[in-house]
């Protein structure tokens, strides 16, 4: 007899097929003759419904398994990557990898200052500061300008108010002289112009101007990005978690100053010096924690007002300088037709030279006065920023960093800031009182 399943010949006494294992069914002659005829002649509409459903839904275990694999999410499907280029022309061993899920990819968003996506390790994925909420003041203080003006009325900000008032008086006096206005109207005009300059200083334009003035540039070196971005991410996350008022898009910049330092200004700008990169990662994080403390306490507006609000005074001095130069040229032309032209030329050149020196000296003194006056208010804020960094867990490293200050002399704005800061020894003593451990 033959197996009805695979067609192989089997013994008449066998119960199962030796080839496919199917159960053998024996028919008598009548059944063998009738059954094929019944299956061939039975109309399709006479097929039982249950039999048709079983026929349509039943699948072999192999097909069911293949279907299950195909229904898995695309990001979990193993993909093949070519072997390393060091292999035999790409025909080496194949490495199986698993693509990252959309949730995991969201953790790889770089900090705002970087255009390069740096994939941090699994231990650092928790520092995704962009997922933290940002809180804002309520009422009228939700407008940043009004919030700034209200904070200026606090007792500790009286020196800043004095500086702003003197600026208004100088601008008003210049408007009075140039446009021959009554002194009162000149002061009003000066106040309007200066308020406009303060608004500009508190805007992104003001932050941009201050960055340009201090040589702050975007970080583009891949080595610097790969080192600073994980540090920035960690400190940013901890700082924003401690104070949700911190902006969610603070950007990090760098300048070429060789002194180890950093500064924050406005609401979204933080800059580190090239010299800071010579220190350990922990000390860099301690410095960033200190600067985030300034952002959290909104101390940075004072520097911004001094750096950009002072632009109006600078423009006035430049206008006066141009006027002196034009007058010098006119006097020189007139001296050609004078009998004492030689003496007039010498006197004119001497007056012009002395006037320009005096103007530049006054400008430097005025800038130094503004910085010193405003930073005098911020001396206490330096201790608060140190405490903020300590509370983030960087107190010991901040002590070690402060002990190195003074080894390299800072230039520009950093020199002015350092001259008005408390002594490093006093700051270290405060940190030790808070519980930091410092060893020489």
Image (cartoon, rainbow, N blue to C red):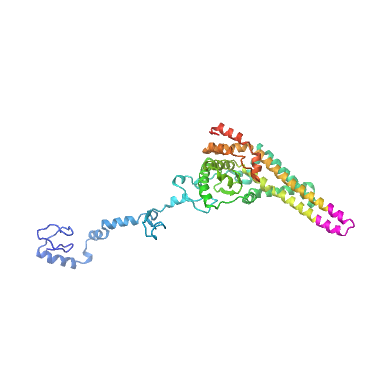
By secondary structure, the bulk of the magenta-drawn segment is best described as helix
Q: In this rendering, would 264 be left or right of 320?
A: left
- Give yes or no for residue 9 being in the magenta stretch: no
Left or right relative to 382: residue 311? right
Q: Nearer the viewer, residue 117 or 351?
A: 351
Residue 431 % position (x, y): 57, 34
Q: Position of residue 123 (x, y in %)?
A: 45, 44
The magenta segment: 328-347
Depth check, front residue: 238 or 409: 409
Q: Quadrant of the N terminus?
A: bottom left
> For the view shown, which residue lies furthest in the top direction?
433
| Quarter of the figure with residue 7 | bottom left
Q: Where is residue 107? Give x, y as percent.
A: 47, 49
Q: Can the viewer see residue 318?
A: yes
Horizontally, is 332 left or right of 223 in the view?
right
On screen, 12 above or below 118? below
Q: Residue furthest right?
A: 339
Q: Is residue 331 magenta?
A: yes
Q: Splitting the image into 4 quarters, where does residue 410 fall?
A: top right
Q: Compared with residue 180, is residue 240 higher up or lower down, i.e. above or below?
A: above
Q: Quadrant of residue 89?
A: bottom left
Badge count:
0
């Amino acid at each position: 007899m033959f197996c009805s399943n695979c067609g192989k010949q089997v013994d008449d006494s066998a119960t199962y097929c030796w080839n496919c294992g199917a159960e053998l069914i024996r028919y008598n002659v009548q059944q063998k003759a009738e059954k094929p005829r019944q299956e061939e002649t039975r109309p399709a509409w006479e097929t039982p419904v249950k039999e048709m459903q079983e026929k349509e839904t039943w699948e072999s275990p192999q097909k069911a398994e293949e279907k299950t694999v195909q229904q898995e999410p695309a990001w979990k499907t193993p993909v093949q990557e070519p072997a390393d280029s060091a292999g035999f022309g790409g025909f080496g061993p194949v490495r199986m990898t698993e693509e990252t899920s959309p949730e995991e990819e969201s953790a790889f968003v770089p900090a705002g200052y970087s255009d390069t996506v740096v994939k941090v390790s699994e231990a650092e994925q928790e520092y995704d500061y962009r997922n933290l909420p940002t809180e804002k003041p309520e009422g009228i203080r939700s407008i940043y300008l009004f919030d700034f003006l209200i904070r200026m009325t606090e007792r500790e900000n009286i020196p800043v108010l004095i500086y702003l008032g003197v600026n208004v008086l100088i601008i008003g006096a210049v408007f009075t002289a140039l446009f021959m206005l009554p002194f009162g109207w000149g002061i009003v005009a000066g106040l309007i112009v200066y308020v406009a300059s303060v608004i500009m200083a508190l805007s992104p334009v003001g932050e941009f101007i201050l960055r340009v003035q201090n040589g702050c540039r975007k970080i583009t070196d891949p080595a610097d990005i790969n080192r600073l971005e994980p540090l920035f991410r960690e400190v940013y996350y901890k700082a924003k978690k401690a104070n949700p008022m911190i902006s969610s898009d603070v950007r990090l910049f760098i300048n070429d100053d060789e002194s180890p330092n950093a500064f924050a200004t406005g609401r979204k700008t933080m800059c580190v010096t090239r010299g800071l990169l010579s220190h350990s990662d922990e000390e860099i994080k301690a410095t960033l924690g200190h600067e985030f403390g300034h952002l959290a306490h909104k101390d940075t507006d004072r520097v911004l007002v001094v750096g950009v609000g002072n632009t109006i005074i600078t423009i006035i001095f430049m206008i006066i300088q141009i006027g002196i130069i034009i007058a010098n040229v006119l006097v020189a032309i007139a001296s050609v037709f004078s009998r004492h032209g030689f003496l007039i030329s010498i006197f004119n050149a001497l007056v012009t030279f002395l006037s320009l020196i005096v103007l530049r000296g006054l400008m430097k003194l005025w800038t130094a006065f503004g910085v010193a006056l405003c930073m005098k208010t911020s001396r206490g804020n330096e201790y608060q920023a140190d405490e903020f960094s300590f509370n983030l867990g960087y107190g010991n490293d901040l002590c070690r960093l402060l002990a190195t200050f003074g080894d390299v002399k800072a230039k520009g704005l950093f020199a002015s800031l350092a001259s008005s800061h408390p002594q490093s020894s006093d700051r270290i003593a405060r940190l030790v009182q808070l519980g930091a451990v410092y060893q020489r």
